[in-house]
Amino acid sequence: MTMVQERESTTVPGGSRLSRPLWLGLGFVFVALGFIGALLPLLPTTIFLILAAGCFARSSPRLEAWLIDHPRFGPTLVAWREQGAIPRKGKALACAGMALGYGLFAWGARPGPWLAVGVAAAMLGCAWYVLSRPTAV
């Protein structure tokens, strides 16, 4: 049984008449942000697609399966869902993006020392989280 058939045979959890359209709309917003992130260097892609898959899981098994079965993004989503794993290339790009983002912030905003340290600490915490996840094969 494929992932699509398996998901279509189940009911949508939390799928009330009012919440399903909200989850569906959020899913489409996150997919749009994810695809924009695939084109823009500093906007992340995967986190938006993970959020979209979660929204579609609550509203549309067919669209959730479309994301999970997508040839480019599906394997990363499945690795995250099953193991909480991030590919080595994804870890490197995430950390490089955070470093570049901090560099642009420091250069463009010229923050005071407390703000600079606070933002650096937040980004280091995010980088630590990304690096602490299992590595997807």
Image: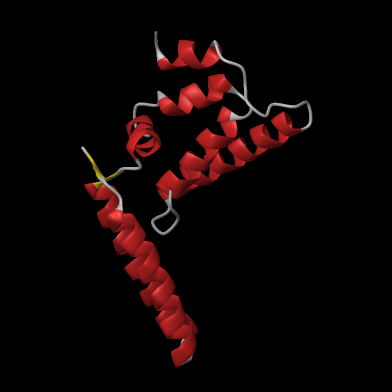
Going by the picture, which residue comes out furthest to the right?
A: 18
Q: Indicate the quadrant containing the C terminus: top left, top right, bottom left or bottom right.
A: top left
Residue sitting at 40 percent across and 23 percent down? 69
Q: How is the image coloured?
A: secondary structure
Q: Is residue 116 left or right of residue 85?
A: right
Q: Position of residue 45 (x, y in %)?
A: 43, 47
Q: Is residue 82 above or below residue 111?
A: above
* Towards the viewer: 102 or 136: 136
Q: Indicate the quadrant containing the N terminus: top left, top right, bottom left or bottom right.
A: top left
Residue sitting at 49 percent across and 45 percent down? 48
Q: Is residue 15 above or below residue 97?
A: above
Q: Is residue 105 above or below residue 17?
A: below
Q: Position of residue 22 (x, y in %)?
A: 71, 36
Q: Position of residue 99 (x, y in %)?
A: 33, 69
* Quadrant housing residue 95: bottom left
Residue sitting at 36 percent across and 65 percent down? 98
Q: Is residue 122 above or below residue 27?
A: below
**Count of labels shown?**
0
* Towards the viewer: 34 or 134: 134
Would residue 111 be seen by someone viewing this image from the given angle? Answer: no
Q: Is residue 131 left or right of residue 60?
A: left
Q: Position of residue 87 (x, y in %)?
A: 26, 44
